[in-house]
Image: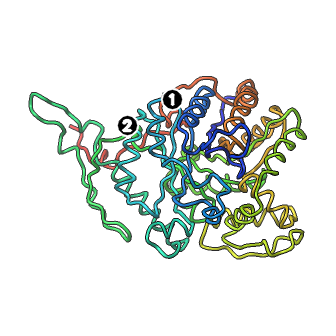
Amino acid sequence: MSTKQMHLGAFLQDAGHHIAAWRHPDAPVGAGMNFDHFHYLARRAEAAKFDMIFLGDQMTFQYEEDESLGRTSRGANFDPLTLLSALAVSTRDIGLIATGSTSYNEPFNIARKYASLDHISKGRAGWNVVTSWTEGEARNFSRREVMEHGLRYRRAQEFVGVVKGLWDSWDNDALLDDRQQGLFFDPDRLHRLDHQGEFFQVRGPLTISRAPQGYPVIVQAGSSADGQTLAARHAEVIFTAQRNLAEAQTFYREVKSQLTDWGRSPDSLKIMPGIFPVVGESAAHAREKFEQLQELVSPEIGWAVLARHLGGFDLSEYSPDDPVPDLPLTQGNQSRQALLLAFARRENLTIRQLYWHVNGTRGHWAIFGTAEEIADTLETWFREGAADGFNIMAPWLPGGLDEFIDHVVPVLQQRGLFRKEYSGSTLREHLGLQVPESRYATRKVVT
């Protein structure tokens, strides 16, 4: 029996993470705008004792070509914070993580919204920090082009610092509700931030009291050097996309080693690679199920998906059997581009093979096999310093998540690798994270 246990998140993407999941016969109609669908998934993940559900967000059609082609479900989805606020009152224990962009928001808005979700859920909120890198999003927010990569991350560093400062606006005991004295709060326990920085000038204080978790859990998704620096300084969970054990171990070791630069312990950041599991009666059966989804991909959107993951480079004019050409990194998602190109080199992939890989798994690590075989692989990564847990990216929903919960989770539980019951009620308690102390706590005079 293991004493240390892995963490599991359920990454919910409308009908599933495969680009053609919406065409699966079991996928609900209009999954991205179907609350009952998400309610079912959240309750299933909670019953299985997952640490969290996770919602990504992109404020544009995910693939611009689809505006005219209409061949994916990626352009019609709920706002994630609105959806999680509804799910907060229909769940009790599971963590609720929503993506919020530092490129197209202001720190005050983000601080207030996520603190509100933390109050509504009684301490289960998390903020996935992204910098937004698509041209469509830039144009939806009055910009002609995507902000330069380094500049995006410099802005994000300041943005997160301001949000954390706003979350410290109220001391834990600031609210008095003293009706006899007519004093609702103690003004000496309310703090104005008065931030003046390169990108933001924010007065404060925040207009909502301190969140139940102190701060909602801060999550970061990205593996570039700038992303790693942001994670080492601020993040408490990092979602990443390594595809083999050695690559994952290197990333795990490098990111954890940076934490000491910020006075943090290795356990203060949980590294959770995204995995795309296909469960079958055998590995061959699992691949057969996957191939059935692959056959549903429309070529017009397939090439657009590949181009997007390669920073905008269209390879449709090349021969599909040519090797993947050398491509420079763009201002987009550089970590994803670099990982894909390194994978193509290592595996000697042709353009056709990379096309099918990206369209099938969104460039993430795919595992095909029986429940025991998938559990074996997860256990190896967990025990050998490659992951603290995993973000489960079901190929199609609800069936792909149901199969993982029904077959893989019991194996992990039998091995003592995953909980059978929650031991706490907040997301921080699930993850073994401390409640952050307010920056103003040390200023209090003890008498």
Residue type marked 1: Asp
User: How many marks do you count on the picture?
Assistant: 2
Q: In this view, does 445 lie above or below 416?
A: below
Residue 143 image label: none
Measured as percent of width and height from the top left, residue 291 is found at 84, 47
Vertically, is 154 above or below 269? Answer: below
Q: Is mark 2 on a helix, strand or loop?
A: helix
Q: x and y percent of residue 399 in the render?
A: 71, 35
Return the x and y of residue 396 as percentages of the image width and height: 70, 42
Q: Is residue 355 above or below residue 124?
A: below
Q: Residue at x 73, y 42 (%)?
A: 24
Residue named by callout 2: 119
Residue under the point 68% across and 48% down: 17
Say which residue appears at 73% left-offset and 45% top-offset. 276
Are the residues flagged by discs 2 and 1 in contact, CB closer than 8 Å?
Answer: no
Q: What residue type is labelled 2?
A: His
Residue 242 x, y percent position in the rendering:
72, 54
Of the image marks 2 and 1, the number of the one nearer the N terminus: 1
Q: Distance of mark 2 from mark 1, alpha carbons?
A: 13 Å
User: Which residue position is annotated with label 1?
Assistant: 93
